[in-house]
Amino acid sequence: MNYDDATTIFEAIKTKESQLKHDVVLCAIRYARIRTDWRLLAIHERKALDPSRTAAHNALIDATNILSRAMAKAGENTTWRRQLGEERMEIGDWACHVHAYLGIQAR
């Protein structure tokens, strides 16, 4: 996932505020933080963190799927979800881009 694609997807989901969109962003931020922490840990610490990292990743994927279904039901554009894809690593990368994007915007 590159920055431009990640930004396009993020912009597509934040066009109209809703609790479900907010939930996706919170899940992305949470997963990205855990992923960063995981990278900095020793192997034995990574093993201890793996279950919560996987749970956060699953929650992110679930949140994107729930949002996509709700948007489709409301007649909103859901091409962002197809662009995001189904590959776990790509979805995780997208979460890291969202985290970075928001962090830079907050300056």
Image (cartoon, grey):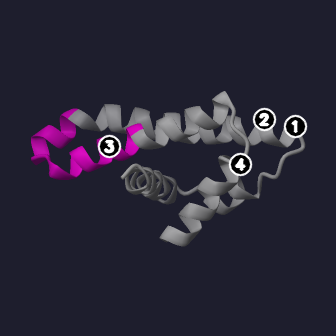
On the image, numbered disc 4 is attached to which residue?
15
Q: Is residue 47 left or right of residue 11?
A: left
Residue 41's x, y, as percent? 13, 46
Residue on which the image places disc 2: 70
Q: Residues within 10 Å of mark 4 (few under 14, many from 20)?
A: few
Q: Secondary structure at mark 3?
A: helix
Cα separation, mark 2 vs mark 1, equals: 6 Å
Q: Residue at x 27, y 49 (%)?
A: 36
Q: Is residue 34 above or below residue 1?
A: above
Q: Are marks 4 and 2 in contact (CB under 8 Å)?
A: no
Q: Disc 1 or 4, which lies upstream in sequence? A: 4
- Element type where label 4 sits in the image: loop
Give amino acid for label 2. Answer: Ala
| Mark 2 touches mark 1? (CB < 8 Å) | yes
Residue 74 in sight from this viewpoint:
yes
Judge whether 37 appears above or below 26 on screen.
below
Q: Which residues are magenta?
A: 30-48
Q: What's the distance in space between the residues labelled 3 and 4, CA to CA? A: 24 Å
Identify the amino acid type marked 4.
Thr
Q: Give the mark toward the camera: 3 or 4.
A: 4
Of label 1 and label 3, which has the lower sequence position? Answer: 3
Query: Decide: marks 3, 4 in contact (CB < 8 A)?
Result: no
Q: Position of residue 25 (x, y in %)?
A: 53, 40
